[in-house]
């Protein structure tokens, strides 16, 4: 099997898995399964940040939320600690599923394990591939989900929102920062003002 065929089969298998998501999202007037839509946003932003991304990064970005609906946030209880436990459990699940699919499509074990490591984000800020995945995910959040997240949480006060924005910013690389600043002009005015305030007065 050629490398291009192997990559195409892996991405197709990930897409088929995410097409089973019962939740939906509107994208350019089309109704798509939510995690499939998310994976396409991830791929688009990967190529925006990295002109010629590696196969492993194409796979990792496509599998960032693979089958996430099978592990709902509600299973982990309320509170920040439970939220982080859910995020870590999701990362492990996504990494495991991506590695399984890669192995089925003929990737060697070391490449499967590499993508699994990237998706768990254990090496964030240390590993360039993991950092790129985080930059891509942050760009997708800012472009597609920040406004909805804001509207869905009217009980959050200003300081909480500033903290969320600053922590998102802190996870990004300079390359991600540049892309986010270019995107900022497309944000709704209230979110642009929030971003500007958060960056003007960094968290202590």
Image: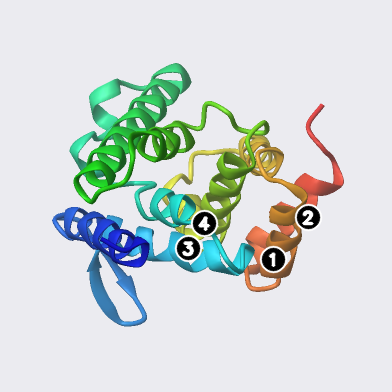
Distance between mark 1 and mark 2 Cα atoms: 9 Å
Residue 121: give x, y in percent of width and height: 51, 32
Mark 3 or 2 closer to N-term?
Answer: 3
Distance between mark 1 and mark 3 Cα atoms: 12 Å
Label 3 vs label 2, nearer the camera: 3
114 or 189, which is in the foreground? 114
Mark 1 or 2 closer to N-term?
Answer: 1
Mark 3 or 4 closer to N-term?
Answer: 4
Image quarter in which the C terminus is found: top right
**Which quadrant holds residue 190?**
bottom right
> Which of the numbered marks, if any, corresponds to residue 198?
none
Distance between mark 3 and mark 4 Cα atoms: 24 Å
Residue marked by disc 3: 144
Residue 161: give x, y in percent of width and height: 62, 41
Residue marked by disc 4: 54
Distance between mark 2 and mark 4 Cα atoms: 34 Å
Residue marked by disc 1: 184
Q: Secondary structure at mark 1?
A: helix
Label 1 vs label 2, nearer the camera: 1
Residue marked by disc 2: 196
């Amino acid at each position: 099997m050629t490398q291009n065929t192997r990559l195409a089969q892996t991405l197709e298998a990930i897409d088929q898995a995410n097409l089973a998501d019962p939740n939906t999202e509107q994208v350019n007037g089309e109704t798509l399964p939510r995690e499939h839509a998310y994976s396409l946003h991830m791929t688009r932003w990967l190529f925006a940040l990295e002109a010629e991304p590696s196969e492993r990064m194409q796979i990792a970005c496509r599998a960032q939320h693979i089958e996430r609906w099978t592990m709902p946030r509600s299973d982990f209880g309320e509170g920040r600690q439970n939220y982080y436990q859910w995020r870590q459990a999701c990362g492990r699940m996504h990494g495991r599923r991506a590695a399984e699919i890669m192995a089925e499509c003929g990737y060697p074990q070391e490449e499967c394990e590499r993508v699994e490591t990237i998706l768990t984000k254990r090496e964030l800020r240390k590993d360039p591939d993991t950092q790129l995945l985080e930059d891509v995910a942050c760009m997708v959040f800012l472009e597609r989900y920040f406004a909805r997240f804001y509207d869905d949480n009217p009980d959050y006060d200003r300081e909480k929102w500033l903290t969320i924005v600053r922590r998102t910013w802190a996870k990004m690389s300079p390359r991600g920062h540049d892309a986010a600043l270019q995107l900022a002009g497309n944000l709704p005015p209230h979110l642009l003002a929030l971003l500007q305030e958060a960056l003007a007065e960094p968290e202590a």
